[in-house]
Image (cartoon, helix red, strand yellow):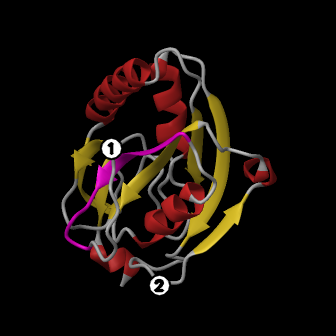
Amino acid sequence: MHEDLSRVVYSEDEIQRRVRELGAELAREYAGVRPLIVGILKGSFFFLADLVRAMDAPVELRFLKASSYGAGTVTSGNVVIDIASDLQADISGRHVLVVDDIIDTGVTLRRIVDLLAEKNPASLKVCVLLTKTAARRAEVRHDYAGFVCPPEFLVGYGLDYAERYRNLPYIGVLRPEIYI
């Protein structure tokens, strides 16, 4: 365990097992269609890569970058969405799956879902690795979730604090003295 963590919440094995389960479920859901999977950068990067490999189905990937945290531990409420040029393409009539690392307040994901819904996809679903209900400020649904997580500041497996800890293969609680 990294010295900046107080404890590990989800081990590497637990994460990989759950990602394989989600991948199998999504492969069944999208059997016969090639979904357009939109990964939210940067946090979903590790989860998305493992998830699409576990799907065993043809997929198309697109990305967008969204942020509301900056270097803080709580959302600023100011959501910045940078739609990559490849997401400017027409998605109307497509089956779209948004993949993100965590729903915390829901503010960022709500804005993304609203933006994509305006583009008239055939279906629009959301898959997240973690959902944290304690801090929810915006109503946002998810169709698939890996884990319901505790109301603590988590890092690892894509989750970061000031661009650190993303590469940990597990998810743990960051010691408060690191960010206070």
Q: What residue is at 52 percent from the left and 77 percent from the top?
A: 71
Residue 35, position as x, y percentages in the image: 56, 30
Nearest the eye: 108 or 172:
108
Q: What residue is at 40 percent from the left and 76 percent from the top?
A: 73
Residue 49, position as x, y percentages in the image: 55, 33
Instruction: Give the overall secondary structure of the magenta segment.
Output: strand
134 is higher (above) or lower (below) than 85: below
**Which residue position is annotated with label 2?**
76
Estimate how packed mark 2 is, as few (under 14), some (14 to 19) or many (20 or more) residues with alpha carbons within 10 Å.
Answer: few
Asked if residue 131 is among those painted magenta in the image, a careful observer would answer yes
Label 2 to label 1: alpha-carbon separation: 26 Å
Q: Does dot 2 land on a helix, a strand or a loop?
A: loop
Nearest the eye: 92 or 34:
92
Q: What residue is at 47 percent from the left and 56 percent from the top?
A: 165
Residue 94 picture quarter = top right
Estimate how packed mark 1 is, as few (under 14), some (14 to 19) or many (20 or more) residues with alpha carbons within 10 Å.
Answer: few
The kind of residue on which mark 2 rests is Ser
Span shown in magenta: 122-135
Asked if residue 55 is among those painted magenta in the image, a careful observer would answer no
Mark number displayed over residue 1: none
149 is higher (above) or lower (below) than 175: above
112 is higher (above) or lower (below) than 171: below
Q: Does dot 1 land on a helix, a strand or a loop?
A: loop
Q: Earlier in the sequence, mark 2 or mark 1?
A: 2
